[in-house]
Amino acid sequence: MLEKTTICVILLLVLGLTGLDAQNSINAGGNNVLSSGGSVSYSIGQTVYTFNIGQSGSVAQGVQQPYEISVLTELVGAVDNEISIYPNPTNGLIFLNVENPDEQNLVFQLYNMQGELLLENKINLNETKISMIDLPPTLYFVKVLKNLEEIATFKIIKN
């Protein structure tokens, strides 16, 4: 009886471990590039990386960040016209576009990942410039409010 139990446990362990893959990722694409100055291997489609800066340039090692544009929430019928924000990701400036902002009593709010309000202003122009130049690279949220009621939230990546 003890031998049958031992054999069953060993079989289960062997069969269970055969499907494990460590350090494996499925990528959308990638390649190896060789030149006289060195070589680079890259992959497309994953979101983890490290960034190194040297005297002759910089390199993002590992698997790269994706290009991403996100509208987290948008209430249908809450705004007379579309709201858009670009560029995303950004290096420091983003532009918020709204048609007829004065007629809608709109305000934008910029939040960090911890939910702290960093900036709040009334939207007076069709294109509002929001400066993020002095902010560190990370993820931010821009909320658009109409009469103090949230109508849209955008996720912004600052490089």
Image (tube, rainbow, N blue to C red):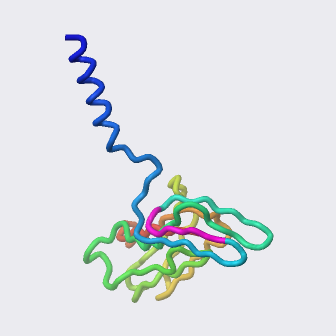
Can residue 68 be found in the magenta stretch? no
Using residue 19 as the reference point, say whether residue 107 is left or right of it.
right
Using residue 156 as the reference point, say whether residue 83 is left or right of it.
left
Q: Position of residue 74 (x, y in %)?
A: 32, 71
Q: Position of residue 19 (x, y in %)?
A: 32, 44
Q: Is residue 43 above or below residue 4?
A: below
Tell me where residue 78 sits by quadrant. bottom left
Q: What residue is at 36 percent from the left and 43 percent from the top?
A: 20
Residue 142 visible within the image: no
For this rendering, which residue is in front, 159 or 12? 12
Q: Count up the numbered dots.
A: 0
Q: Is residue 1 above or below residue 95?
A: above
User: Considering the image in quadrants, where does the C terminus appear?
Assistant: bottom right
User: Considering the image in quadrants, where does the N terminus appear?
Assistant: top left
Can residue 40 be found in the magenta stretch? yes
Residues in magenta?
A: 39-46
Extreme residue in the right direction: 55
Q: What residue is at 57 percent from the left and 62 percent from the top?
A: 138
Q: Is residue 137 above or below residue 128?
A: above
Tell me where residue 81 sits by quadrant. bottom left
Q: What residue is at 57 percent from the left and 67 percent from the top?
A: 119
Q: Position of residue 52 (x, y in %)?
A: 69, 62
Q: What residue is at 43 percent from the left and 69 percent from the top?
A: 154
Q: Position of residue 109 (x, y in %)?
A: 50, 67
For this rendering, which residue is in front, 78 or 92? 92
Extreme residue in the top direction: 1
Which is the main secondary structure of the residues drawn in magenta?
strand
Residue 55 visible within the image: yes
